[in-house]
Image: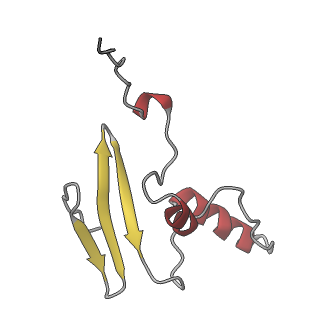
Amino acid sequence: MLVLSRQKDESIVIGDDVEITIVDVRGDRVRLGITAPKEIPVHRREIYDAIQREKAEGKKPQKKPEKTARKQAEKEPEEQSESTPQEQPEKEPQQQHK
């Protein structure tokens, strides 16, 4: 396994067609942006494992209700991951000017 250190807005290139960019780091979570040709599937590990299990059982993989990373990126370029309330910055109360 190759282990690399990267900071926000830095990238890793795999082959000629795949680029992984560090989009954000929040605590122990890292947000990645992945650019790859449409013919290269990109899945989170747990989704990939589920697809492989279904293939091994001879079932056609079921479509998940969640958005794929590529479709989500096209529709929501600014917010591409699920957020939990603790990840959202608290809004400061606005002061009224008199």
Judge left or right: residue 76 versus residue 23.
Answer: right
Between 79 and 55, which is closer to the camera in this rendering?
A: 79
Between 29 and 70, which is closer to the camera in this rendering?
A: 70
Residue beneath the point at 50% across and 34% down: 84
Judge left or right: residue 60 versus residue 18.
Answer: right
In x, y percent, where is residue 60? 79, 74
Residue 8's place in the image compared with 82, above or below, is below
| Residue most extreme to the right | 59
Q: Quadrant of the N terminus?
A: bottom left
Between 59 and 17, which is closer to the camera in this rendering?
A: 17
Residue 95: quadrant of the picture: top left
Between 77 and 22, which is closer to the camera in this rendering?
A: 77
Residue 48's place in the image compared with 55, above or below, is above
Total marks shown come to 0
In x, y percent, where is residue 67? 62, 60
Residue beneath the point at 52% across and 82% down: 38
| Residue most extreme to the bottom | 16
Q: Quadrant of the C terminus?
A: top left
| Residue most extreme to the top | 98
Residue beneath the point at 19% across and 55% down: 7
Judge left or right: residue 19 versus residue 82.
Answer: left
Residue beneath the point at 80% across and 75% down: 58
In x, y percent, where is residue 14? 31, 79
In x, y percent, where is residue 20? 33, 69
Q: How is the image coloured?
A: secondary structure
